[in-house]
Image (cartoon, helix red, strand yellow):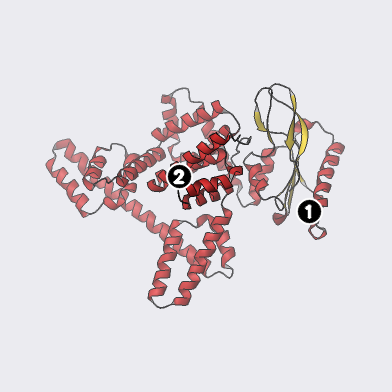
């Protein structure tokens, strides 16, 4: 890890100069976490002590990823350097990097860094090297542009029109990006911007099909947790007048759609007359369609996961195969793996069962290792006994106890609630309150962080 340096910075808002700690070289081989800090806009961030402006500093930066043999250099256009001065600066940064590496790692590519005059273009190059396609980058930028269009809507009526025109684009990835931008604005001290984005998200959750589905799913998940009966579920479904909301209800209450449910619904149809009877018949037909669509989606997902499991199982290097497909390994994967272990044991194939267990251990270990530090900490807290065990862990990790951790907890609580994991969400809520109280009592000042860019 390269030591930070003190640099004199001119504030772009008020023009005042102040000293700031900066890092001019990022070597992923020596400091793996520096990459995520750069891509999330948390590297070289400072706050002007005179006007409070905060953000990522526009300074020269050398980026090195030895595994990908990638050497990139960012030179801000505002430096007003001539060609010779640029080459001297690049040479000085490169020589500093070379001197930190052992002789066997000093390769030819280190003598020819690729130069960028836009930090965004350099970060695009970094994520492209990770296998993210230009199409994916363009799709992400299109979502950013759509968020800006929605923000500029002059009224809620105009916003509704824009939502109808772009409803299919307002998907999980869209809301995930919107949440990242909200967190970014919070971290960079842009309170007004964060509130503007937060208000937009709340409106979109009420107007978009995705939002309606998730809101209905969460409502039913919470009601089921409290003991909602099938009759109560039927009444809620009958009152539903929005197709997207209906889908959310059916997704959360799929197990309620048994013979008895449809018998009760048919009885309501037979007792009704005229338009109401017709509405209920159409509702029954739509419920069956949604149920069949959901079942087909589940079957397709199961088939894909089974294929993935056996692809990894038959690979020459299972650990490498797991890491290559880590983004596809989820709860369904482990459920199918567990079912195969049980089947192997039932058929007396103990060796196969043991190898499958080892595969599960490899996957779990890889998932744990790939998790960000705050997620690892939260997982430890969820496994600990509340409140004494969680208090001990929080005290042991006070360097991670900051507003960023609390925001991550808040986002996870929302996700858990949407997925119907109400008990875990409630447990994490208590831990979050405990962490917030400890942060307040210790008067721990959260680190200054900058704008999250849409690359992380």
Q: Nearer the viewer, residue 181 or 271?
A: 181
Q: Quadrant of residue 82?
A: top right
Q: Quadrant of residue 271?
A: top left
Label 1 vs label 2: CA separation?
47 Å
The residue at the point 55 percent across, 60 percent down is: 365
* Local secondary structure at mark 2: helix
Mark 1 or 2, closer to the camera: 2
Relative placement, left or right, of 245 versus 121 is left
- Up/down of 346 relative to 269, above or below: below
The picture places residue 373, in percent across and down from the top left corner, at 58, 48
Q: Is residue 134 above or below residue 66?
A: above
Q: Position of residue 281 (x, y in %)?
A: 20, 44
In this rendering, does residue 356 appear at all?
yes
Nearer the observer, 386 or 54: 386
Q: Report if residue 311 is visible in the image.
A: no
The residue tagged 2 is: 428
The crowding category of the residue bearing disc 2, from other C-alpha atoms within 10 Å (few below 14, some 14 to 19, many at least 20), is many
How many numbered marks, from 0 up?
2
First along the sequence among labels 1 and 2: 1
* SS for callout 1: helix
Which label number is shown at residue 222? Answer: none
Left or right of 8 on screen, residue 446: left
- Left or right? Give the position of 84 relative to 371: right
Q: Is residue 268 left or right of residue 205?
A: left
Position of the C terminus by quadrant? top right
**Residue at the disc numbered 1:** 109
Which residue is the extreme one toward the bottom?
348
């Amino acid at each position: 890890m390269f030591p930070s340096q003190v640099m004199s910075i001119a504030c772009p808002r008020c023009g005042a100069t102040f000293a700031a700690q900066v890092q001019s070289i990022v070597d992923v081989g020596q400091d793996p976490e520096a990459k995520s800090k750069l891509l999330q806009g948390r590297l070289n961030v400072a706050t002007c002590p005179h006007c409070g402006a905060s953000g990522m500093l526009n300074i020269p930066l050398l980026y090195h990823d030895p595994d990908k043999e990638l050497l990139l250099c960012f030179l801000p256009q505002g430096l007003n350097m001539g060609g010779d001065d640029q080459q001297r600066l690049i040479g000085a940064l490169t020589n500093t990097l070379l001197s930190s590496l052992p002789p066997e790692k000093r390769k030819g590519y280190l003598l020819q860094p690729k130069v960028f005059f836009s930090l965004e273009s350099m970060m695009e190059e970094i994520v492209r090297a990770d296998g993210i396609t230009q199409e994916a980058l363009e799709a992400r930028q299109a979502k950013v542009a759509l968020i800006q269009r929605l923000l500029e809507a002059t009224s809620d009526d105009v916003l509704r029109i824009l939502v109808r025109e772009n409803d299919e684009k307002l998907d999980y990835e869209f809301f995930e990006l919107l949440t990242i931008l909200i967190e970014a604005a919070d971290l960079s001290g842009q309170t007004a911007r964060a509130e503007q984005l937060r208000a937009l998200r709340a409106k979109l959750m009420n107007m978009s099909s995705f939002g309606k589905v998730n809101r209905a799913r969460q409502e039913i998940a919470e009601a089921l947790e409290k003991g909602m009966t099938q009759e109560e579920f039927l009444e809620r479904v009958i009152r539903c007048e929005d197709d997207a909301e209906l889908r959310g209800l059916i997704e959360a209450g799929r197990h309620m759609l048994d013979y008895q449910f449809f018998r009760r619904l048919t009885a309501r149809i037979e007792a009704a007359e005229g338009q109401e009877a017709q509405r209920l018949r159409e509702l029954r037909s739509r419920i069956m369609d949604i149920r069949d669509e959901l079942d087909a989606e589940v079957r397709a997902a199961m088939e894909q996961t089974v294929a993935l499991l056996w692809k990894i199982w038959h690979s020459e290097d299972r650990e490498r195969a797991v890491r290559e497909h880590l983004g596809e390994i989820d709860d369904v994967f482990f459920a199918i793996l567990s079912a195969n272990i049980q089947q192997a044991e039932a058929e007396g194939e103990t060796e196969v069962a043991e190898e499958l267990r080892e595969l599960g251990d490899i996957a779990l270990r890889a998932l744990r290792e790939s998790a960000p530090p705050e997620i690892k900490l939260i997982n430890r807290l969820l496994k600990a006994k509340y409140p004494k065990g969680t208090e001990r862990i929080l005290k042991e990790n006070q360097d991670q106890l900051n507003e960023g951790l609390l925001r991550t907890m808040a986002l996870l609580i929302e996700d858990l609630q949407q997925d119907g994991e109400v008990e875990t969400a409630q447990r994490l809520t208590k831990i979050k309150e405990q962490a917030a109280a400890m942060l307040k009592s210790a008067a721990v000042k959260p680190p200054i962080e900058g704008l999250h860019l849409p690359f992380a």
